[in-house]
Amino acid sequence: MLWRSILIILVSGLVWWVTPAEAASCTKGTNCYCDKVQGGSLNDPQLIVCEDWEASTLHDNVGFGGGTPYYGPWYDGTGFASGGRGFNSYMAKTYPSSGAGLWRNPNPVSPTLGESCAFTDCWPAEYRLDNLWQGNNEACIDIIKTGSSNANDEGAELGIPDAPGTSDNRGAWDGQQAFGYRVQPNNGPCGILGTPSFTAVTEIGITMAVAYGDNTGSLNTISNCVGGQPCPIKHEEYGNSGASFNQETMMGNVGLNQVNGFPFAPAHFTTSQSACNTALAAATVSVGQADCTNAPALRIGVNASEYVQSTDWPFGKWGCVRAHKSGMGTSNVSLKIWYGNGLTEKLIFSMTNFNGAALANQSYNFFIWNSYMNANSPEGGYPGLDGKWRRWIDNVHIRNGVPVSCAQIGFGGGSVSRAGSSGGLRATGGVKF
């Protein structure tokens, strides 16, 4: 457990107060979060993807030449022609198809580990404060490790992620490591950093821990881009290999109420604006807000009565995000999004009875680890990022069904505001969400 909990029963209902504790250490392959989910004590027969980022090869210079499941460190080119830097790294092998943050010929010019990249594009580099991999100029990925000097890696303005309501500088949410999307003022838009693929599903439940750098609110990309409007910032995108577009199922900065509702402003591409308008008119949006644009896309947002970023989820703090999308390919698509911090969980968006024929994707069979920032690329006349930026994620659990609770990934329990039922998955301590 990552939280010590006290159960208090009130006349009006059940509230589960929690106090933060240190992130629990674990041994990958034995008792880390995904070990429990993939056949252990939390075994999930409906699992699609689980990633806790605890493979030692993601941070340390170990396992060169290794095979499944952890492969080698970032520079490991084993199994490829000479000069295939990074071909045998954990990220390249587990989540292929990265298109950003890659070593390119002739870098590194004088390698101290492995070989230089001998091709136009090689495989992903990772940032380290000590530049052990000699990839800091390219890297769009930053694996932070609790207790390591690399947890505070590029300046005080980024901060180190804290538990909700604390300044504990815990670093990784759970275990010892977490994944960071690294975006710099001058390293382009970054973007796709790998693609998990799976058998197509029409129902998906997503739970993950997420944190944003302390400086997020002061960057021009969040609040002041072109014409004083927020710039588009992509998060993980889901799609089908037979469709034209991907969709930000639960987070993004391309929908509605982007500043006060950050990061809950995603968009789902549709077949046309008219089809979207017809489907939305027949749907029920009981929490949050939605509209259709000629992109064409269904834009999603939250209302201030459900969520305000500055008070509900201060930058620099870990939070839990869950989403449940079902009925894809039918006339009754349902989408629900929750935010939780261990003290409470809020249903912040709920839409039912949306005709899925209007959506560009009728099912999902992949998603992408994505940090694309239109604001940091030349398209559209955006000014570019005016500072270093991070988004961290941990304990990512994606399944073909109702999402697991925030309690399961370490956020304790919580009172659930509004109609926040997630279908009865049991939270630690016997409280149902």
Image (cartoon, rainbow, N blue to C red):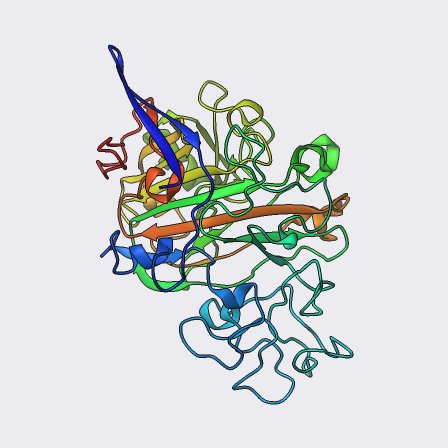
Where is residue 59 drawn, in percent x and y? Answer: 56, 63
Residue at the location (56% across, 60% down)?
192
Q: Is residue 108 visible?
A: yes
Q: Quadrant of residue 323?
A: top left
Residue at the location (54% across, 84% down)?
78
Residue at the location (63% across, 47% down)?
390
Where is residue 151 drawn, in percent x and y? Answer: 62, 50
Taking depth in this image into account, of 279 and 186 the one nearest to the observer is 186
Q: Please give left or right for residue 8 compared with residue 129 in the image.
A: left
The number of discs equals: 0
Q: Quadrant of the N terminus?
A: top left
Q: Quadrant of residue 403?
A: top left
- On screen, residue 125 above or below 236: below
Taking depth in this image into account, of 141 and 430 the one nearest to the observer is 430
Q: Is residue 230 visible?
A: no
- On screen, residue 124 above or below 372: below
Q: Residue furthest bottom?
A: 81
Where is residue 140 drawn, in percent x and y? Answer: 64, 58
Q: Quadrant of the C terminus?
A: top left
Where is residue 36 drawn, in percent x and y? Answer: 30, 55
Residue at the location (40% across, 75% down)?
68
